[in-house]
Amino acid sequence: MDYYEIVTKLVGNINPVGETQVDDERFKNLQAMTELVDKLLSDIDRVAMLSSKPEYSISRAGKFAADFFDSLGISNN
């Protein structure tokens, strides 16, 4: 089981199906998932800000994180 499978199992299904009771629960799951993604992206952004550090291992991580944002078309601050 990988991280994606673990998280989706913990959070639950987020896809609406057109049934109010089911979709209400899935909407709550979607809110939880987006909150998690926001926090994860913030963590990655903090690492991306380190791309110009002189220490190789720090700048390597920073550049990797910055490249990730570039691949998504997201500019990191």
Image (spheres, rainbow, N blue to C red):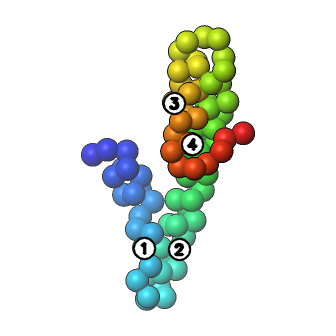
Q: Provide the residue designation for mark 1.
A: 15
Q: Nearer the viewer, mark 3 or mark 2?
A: 3
Q: Residues within 10 Å of mark 1 (few under 14, many from 20)?
A: few
The answer to whether the residues at label 1 and label 4 have Cβ atoms under 8 Å apart is no
Ranked by sequence position, the earlier of labels 2 and 4 is: 2
Q: Provide the residue designation for mark 2.
A: 27
Amino acid type, mark 2 = Phe
Q: Residues within 10 Å of mark 3 (few under 14, many from 20)?
A: some
Residue 18 lies, in percent from the top left, at 44, 88
Q: Which mark is residue 50?
A: none
Residue 32 drawn above or below residue 56: below
Dot 2 falls on a residue whose secondary structure is helix
The answer to whether the residues at label 2 and label 1 have Cβ atoms under 8 Å apart is no
Q: Nearer the viewer, mark 2 or mark 1?
A: 1
Q: Is residue 77 visible?
A: yes
Q: Nearer the viewer, mark 1 or mark 4?
A: 4
Furthest residue toward left: 1
What is the distance, in whole Å, between disc 3 and disc 4 at their CAs?
9 Å
Q: Provide the residue designation for mark 4.
A: 69
Ranked by sequence position, the earlier of labels 3 and 1 is: 1
Residue 64 lies, in percent from the top left, at 51, 30
Dot 3 falls on a residue whose secondary structure is helix
What is the distance, in whole Å, between disc 1 and disc 4 at their CAs?
25 Å
Q: Is residue 16 left or right of residue 34?
A: left
Q: Provide the residue designation for mark 3.
A: 64
